[in-house]
Every structure is written in structure tokens, then in C-alpha cells.
């Protein structure tokens, strides 16, 4: 495929991606930090809905032989150490590597600092990569997937995952409905949004 | 629908998940975001230090091929898509989210910018160690039932929850 066409496809897909991130409000620092403080669950809902949809799509595309899977190799040391540092960064940035760009598009000025910090972080890793890959961070197995471990076809495992996620989301939604978690200004800022129960308390007092 | 201020997280998640169709069929890869920081950062840094391109990892990421530059275009498109969505809904954002004043215990923009820079730095340093982020390991890796990605996502939430609880203040 030509690079020009790939860039055009990427831009188009990115616009859809950014549009959905903005509409879901998951790019808001209030929603991301709120999720990490376990007081707002919109991020988990968007994330799990995307995983389940991807699993169904890939079960069909792979099951009927249209595409090959491209899972990353299981490097447990790197996955754990890298994942912990990545998570700490997400909490402090109030963003993920992808949603940083959505924040910039939405006009958050601090996201420009997140972006530049991210570019420096990626370059710093690049300088360290030859040394780091010789340590335990470079050790690991191959492209391991759960359905192979269970001895079932990928499509079956993917559909089981999607079904399990749907059950989890139904339970999560009945426990924590999504609308009140948006906040007054749709930014996940629930603390400065007067809650319904507070209003009910005020009325009888008057 | 396009002018609404917010969609259900489930609708938005489904739209994002459906993007795996063009990603796998046209580009033959999964959705991801963090590699693009190596492509762009590595390219810019190589103007100052051409020796950087001798590192195989960097050379692979800055090479002019469909996969590398598709992802750079994807993240650029994310900014455009968010801008478009906000313009259609007529939403207005302040330059810093109001939650940061509580989370950082300070209204100083300089403090927030410093924390954002540091957060962005370790976010990408960690993502490159793990070889993926919320998109690559999370949305794509878990959908593919990848064992390593599932471990990375668990660690990511663990690190995020610990930091947001112990370092940041209650928002």
C-alpha cells in the first residue's frame, strides 16, 4: 500500500476516533482521573465496549479467514514495569497517549505539555532501548493468546470475552449509571455539580 | 446525533471498536497510538542527533512505510475529530480542566504544565517499555485475547489507581 493512501486512511479513521472520544467525554481529565480514583466509570465503559466490539469484529474477520491476528508478544517483565509507569503517567497527565490529541483538539492547553513530554519520553526510551532490551525487560515468550491456552478456536474465545464484557457492563450500568457521571459541564467534574440528593435535602429544610 | 454534547459510552465504544475493521483489512494492523510518538519524536530528534537513526528501534519507527505514518495520521486525525465534534456541539473548554485545581491543590497553570509534561514523559516511557498503551494493549490486545496485553492493562490500571489515589488529591 502506498504511504499516501495509508495517511489518508489514517486521517479519516482518526477523525472518527477523535469524534467518538470527544462525544463519549472519555478524553476529559475529570473522567480519566475520576476513573483512576474509582469515582467515575465512564472510561471503563467506553474501554470495555470498544474491546467487546473489537472482539466480535475480529472473531468474524479471523474466523472467516479474512485477516490474520497481530497480537503483541508476551513480555511479562516489560508488560508489568511498563504498564505501571504508563498508568502513573496517565493519572498525572489526565490523558492516554491517544486522548492527549483529543484534548489538544478540544482546546486544553496543558495537553500540549503532555504531548511534548510524551515526545521527549519516547525519545528518551529510544536512547535507552538498546540497553533496556538486554535486561529482563527484553525477556519473554511469543505471541501467546488465551484461546490457544484453552485449546479453543480464537473466534470462540473472542465471543466468550465479548459476552462476559456485556454481562459486566450491564451490572456496572445498573450500579453506576453513566449520565450523572458526565457532570454539569460534560467534563466529569462531579464534585462541583450539585447532586440530586443534595437538592432533595434542601427542599424540606425550607 | 452529531451535535449532541455527549453520547452513551457504549455507542462511542462500539464506534471505536468498529475501527478495527479498516485497521485490519486495509492497514493490516491493530489500532494503536503510542508508536507514533517514537516516529515523530525520533524524526525530530534525529535532526539534532543523526546518530539516533543508527539505533534499530528508531530506524524501524521513522521508516517511511504505510504502518508508521498511518498511525501518525491517525493521532493527528484524533485532534481534528475532537475539534470537529466540539465545534458541532458548541461546547467550550477552559484552557485547563477545573479538576486540576483540586487534584493538584494549586490553581497555578505553571504547576499544571510541569505535571502534564512529567506525566506525558513517563506515560510514553512506560508505554514504550510495555510496547503499547490503552489503545494497542488495551483496546486491540485484549480484543485479540493477548496474554501479555492483559497483564499490561492490569498493571496500567494498578499504576494509575495507585498514583491517582496516593499522589493526586480527591477530585
Image (cartoon, coloured by chain):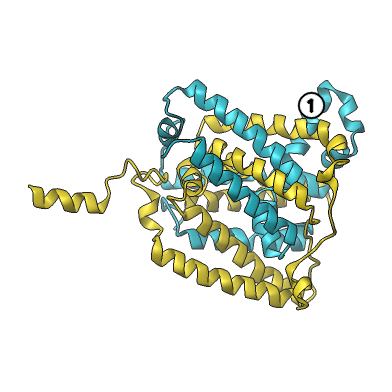
Identified at 64% across, 50% down, the residue is B155
Name of the residue lying farthest toward the left: A206
* B2 on left or right of A98: left
Image x and y of residue A38, in percent: 46, 50
Image x and y of residue B95, in percent: 46, 30
* A52 on left or right of A172: right
Residue at label 1?
B45
Image x and y of residue A120, in percent: 71, 29
* B89 on left or right of B23: left
Identified at 44% across, 51% down, the residue is A40
Identified at 74% across, 72% down, the residue is A147
Image quarter of the N terminus of chain A: bottom right
Instruction: Give the class, few, some or many, for how many residues have Cα within 10 Å of label 1's Cα (few <14, many ≥20).
Output: some
The colour one sees for chain A in the rendered image is yellow
Compared with B97, A193 (above or below) is below
The reply to whether residue B5 is visible in this rendering is yes
- Nearer to the camera, A144 or A180: A144
Q: Which chain is in cyan here?
A: B
In which chain is the residue bearing label 1? B
Secondary structure of residue under mark 1? helix
Compared with A113, B57 (above or below) is below
Identified at 81% across, 47% down, the residue is A3
Compared with B70, A129 (above or below) is above
Image x and y of residue B49, in percent: 85, 23
Amino acid at each position: 500500500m502506498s504511504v499516501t493512501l495509508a495517511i489518508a486512511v489514517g486521517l479519516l479513521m482518526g477523525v472518527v476516533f477523535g469524534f467518538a472520544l470527544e462525544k463519549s467525554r472519555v478524553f476529559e481529565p475529570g473522567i480519566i482521573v475520576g476513573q483512576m480514583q474509582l469515582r467515575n466509570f465512564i472510561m471503563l465503559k467506553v474501554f470495555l465496549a470498544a474491546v467487546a466490539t473489537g472482539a466480535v469484529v475480529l472473531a468474524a474477520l479471523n474466523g472467516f479467514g479474512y485477516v490474520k491476528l497481530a497480537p503483541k508478544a508476551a513480555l511479562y517483565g516489560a508488560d508489568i514495569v511498563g504498564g505501571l509507569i504508563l498508568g502513573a503517567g496517565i493519572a498525572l497527565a489526565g490523558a492516554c497517549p491517544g486522548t492527549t490529541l483529543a484534548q489538544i483538539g478540544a482546546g486544553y492547553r496543558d495537553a500540549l505539555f503532555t504531548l511534548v513530554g510524551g515526545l521527549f519520553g519516547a525519545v528518551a526510551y529510544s536512547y535507552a532501548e538498546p540497553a533496556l532490551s538486554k535486561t529482563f525487560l527484553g525477556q519473554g515468550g511469543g505471541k501467546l493468546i488465551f484461546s490457544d491456552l484453552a485449546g479453543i478456536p480464537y473466534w470462540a474465545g473472542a465471543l466468550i470475552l465479548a459476552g462476559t464484557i456485556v454481562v459486566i457492563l450491564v451490572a456496572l450500568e445498573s450500579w453506576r449509571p453513566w449520565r450523572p457521571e458526565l457532570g454539569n459541564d460534560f467534563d466529569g467534574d462531579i464534585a462541583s455539580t450539585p447532586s440530586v440528593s443534595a437538592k432533595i435535602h434542601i427542599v424540606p429544610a425550607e | 446525533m452529531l451535535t449532541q454534547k455527549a453520547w452513551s459510552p457504549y455507542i462511542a465504544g462500539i464506534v471505536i471498536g468498529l475501527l478495527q475493521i479498516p485497521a485490519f483489512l486495509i492497514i493490516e494492523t491493530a489500532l494503536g497510538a503510542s508508536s507514533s510518538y517514537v516516529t515523530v519524536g525520533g524524526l525530530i530528534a534525529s535532526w539534532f542527533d543523526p546518530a539516533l537513526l543508527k539505533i534499530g528501534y528508531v530506524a524501524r519507527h521513522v521508516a517511511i512505510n504505510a504502518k508508521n505514518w498511518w498511525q501518525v495520521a491517525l493521532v493527528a486525525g484524533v485532534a481534528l475529530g475532537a475539534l470537529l465534534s466540539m465545534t458541532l456541539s458548541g461546547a467550550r473548554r477552559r484552557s485547563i480542566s477545573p479538576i486540576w485545581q483540586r487534584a493538584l491543590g494549586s490553581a497555578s497553570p505553571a504547576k499544571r504544565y510541569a505535571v502534564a509534561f512529567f506525566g506525558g514523559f513517563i506515560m510514553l516511557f512506560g508505554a514504550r517499555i510495555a510496547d503499547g498503551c490503552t489503545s494497542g494493549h488495551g483496546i486491540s490486545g485484549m480484543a485479540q485475547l493477548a496474554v501479555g496485553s492483559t497483564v499490561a492493562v492490569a498493571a496500567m490500571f494498578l499504576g494509575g489507581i495507585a498514583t491517582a489515589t496516593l499522589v493526586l488529591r480527591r477530585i
